[in-house]
Amino acid sequence: MSSVRYTDLSIEQLLACKQDLEQQYAGFAARNLKLDMSRGKPAGSQLDLTNAVLDKLDTFKTEAGVDARNYGGLDGIPEAKKLFSELLSIPEEKLIIGGNSSLNMMYDTIVRFMLFGTCGATPWCKLPKIKFLCPAPGYDRHFAICEDLGIEMITIPMHEDGPDMDMVEQLVANDDSIKGIWCVPLYSNPQGICYSDKVVERLASMKAVADFRIFWDNAYGVHHIYSEEKLADIFAATEKAGNPDRVVYFFSTSKITFPGAGVALLASSLNNVAEFKKHMTIQTIGPDKLNQLRTVKFLKNAEGVRAHMRKLADELKPKFDIVLNTLNKELADTGLATWTNPKGGYFVAIDTLDNCAKETVRLAKEAGVVMTGAGATFPYKKDPRDRNIRIAPTYPTAAELQTAMDLFCICVKLAGVNQLIAQKKA
């Protein structure tokens, strides 16, 4: 564990530390590294655990005798509905099984609301302004959807149990231009936060002056690594509160099987599903049923998914151990950074000293390690304190990851020391 608390040092001591850190940094830069930690991509060794899915199409017929090679099946094959209903405890009639991308389904859903409204309400595109609540740090692609469609984003701070609900409740109760909120409720991207039962209840029952929708992106709902955290049933909560149409739920097997050839789903109230399917009949004649069929044959049932996820956890845990152990060894008690200790999911989030995230990422990139861009975890890529960085440990090998983390910690220290020196000189 680091024995130096840099925030307590004199400017002379900091200058000496700077010189030592620059020498360490130069040593890494001389190695001509080319390591990529910019996205949460599975490594090849992780994808290999799913290769058997490619051999599962021993028949083209569903259990009902329908030829999956042909047109039809707008909302997915019954076998897929049964599997995900069992896994996620969502009634089959509330499910729409789609292609490989839940992000695609999220985008389509917002576009439908923009063009057609929500269950008879005025289409969003005909309103003077549309706003979305964006818990941050959060998922950059959620924010990109809003930016692409001209939806104004309001940053909501994240707490240890989920978004700042006092702020959320006040906003939705008084501003009818706020139409929704993005939520990654279990092992959130990037902090790994799990929404508490109380937060789920408040989201479900809060008073809203608009046709408000919760975009419930449960992307990591079965991605347990260190322990299995539980998430309250958002559908049960909204129905109990008398707001059954409030939630649109998303899930996919993108990081369970193959990201480019997984299965995604949307779930919502019967009213919403009927509305979605009305427009989908114009948009498409049906999803890739062959891929749905082979995915079901590979995963088999809910317990099959859980067994597969235990294999993935065995693959991912050593990498998360590398990240967390290196952060603890190199940065604990330095005063230069704090970080999350997620129990599952795909990321670790670190907060540097204010005004140091961009510099840390720049230093890492120049020495050969590409990180997620600083600011990416906030709406408009603007981290007001320039301190949050997302660490994505899944893609590199264990050896590459250790090298990347060793360099990253030097970059955090160097950026932090330079900031402290500048403050003392000011």
Image (tube, rainbow, N blue to C red):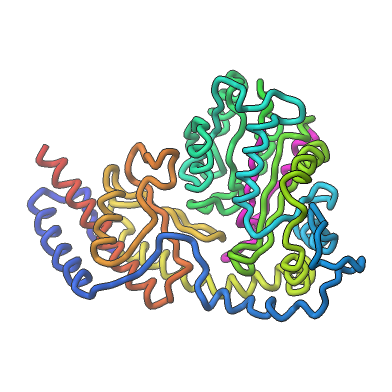
Image quarter (top left, top right, bottom left or bottom right) of the C terminus:
top left
Say if residue 380 shows up in the picture: yes
Q: Which residues are magenta?
A: 213-240
Figure disc tally: 0
The answer to whether residue 262 is left or right of residue 91 is left
Q: Say which of 368 and 107 sits in front.
A: 107
The answer to whether residue 262 is left or right of residue 392 is right
The answer to whether residue 46 is left or right of residue 108 is left
Residue 102 image position (x, y, % from top left)? 63, 53
Image quarter (top left, top right, bottom left or bottom right) of the N terminus:
bottom left
Point 32% across, 72% down: residue: 403
Residue 347 image position (x, y, % from top left)? 48, 58
Based on the displayed image, in which of its 4 quarters is residue 15 positioned?
Answer: bottom left
Say if residue 236 shows up in the picture: no
Q: Say which of 260 and 69 sits in front.
A: 69
Point 27% across, 43% down: residue: 355
Residue 155 is a magenta residue: no
The answer to whether residue 115 is left or right of residue 34 is right
Residue 225 is a magenta residue: yes
Based on the displayed image, in which of its 4 quarters is residue 224 positioned?
Answer: bottom right
Extreme residue in the right direction: 64
Residue 278 image position (x, y, % from top left)? 79, 40
Point 63% across, 38% down: residue: 110
Residue 199 image position (x, y, % from top left)? 63, 38
